[in-house]
Amino acid sequence: KMIITHLLRAFMSSVNGVRLTWKSEIAFRLEILGCILILPFTFWIEAAKGDKLFVVFSLSIMLISELLNTAIEKANDALKKTNDSLIQFSKDAASAAVFVSLCLVGISLLNLVFI
């Protein structure tokens, strides 16, 4: 019973994290909208299963990157309100991770459609 309670709490924390990110980050909402538009297209187009899986994985990595980027930004904002070069570096690096994931989504879509 204790394991079930722990798992339920962990699940609820995850749902809350998605909910809070949805409410506070327009980029996350746009990325979710992109997933809603891209996923049906991915399964409609005739392509190899591996190519379709590449799109699904790249979209998942994009959402994970955005969630982690938001967590880093919020933690840094809570830590220090003034300008700090290390905090700015960590925010920029987290943002770069999102950019790389978006590039991966683009590559996976190009692969799906043209290769």
Image (cartoon, rainbow, N blue to C red):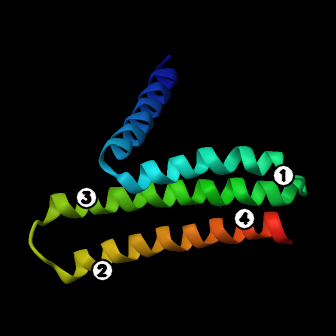
Where 5 falls versus 41 (above or below)?
A: above
Question: Which mark lies nearer to you, 4 or 3?
Answer: 4
N-terminal label among 4 and 3: 3
**Label 2 SS:** helix
Q: Which mark is residue 89?
A: 2
- Whether the residues at callouts 3 and 1 have beta carbons within 8 Å, the answer is no
What's the amino acid at mark 1? Ile
Q: How far separated are the C-alphas under marks 3 and 1?
A: 41 Å
Residue lying farthest to the left in this orientation:
82
Q: How far separated are the C-alphas under marks 3 and 2?
A: 14 Å
The residue that disc 3 covers is 75
Q: Which mark is residue 109?
A: 4
Q: Which mark is residue 45?
A: 1
Drawn side of residue 21 relative to residue 7, left or right: left
What's the amino acid at mark 2? Phe
What's the amino acid at mark 3? Ala
N-terminal label among 1 and 4: 1
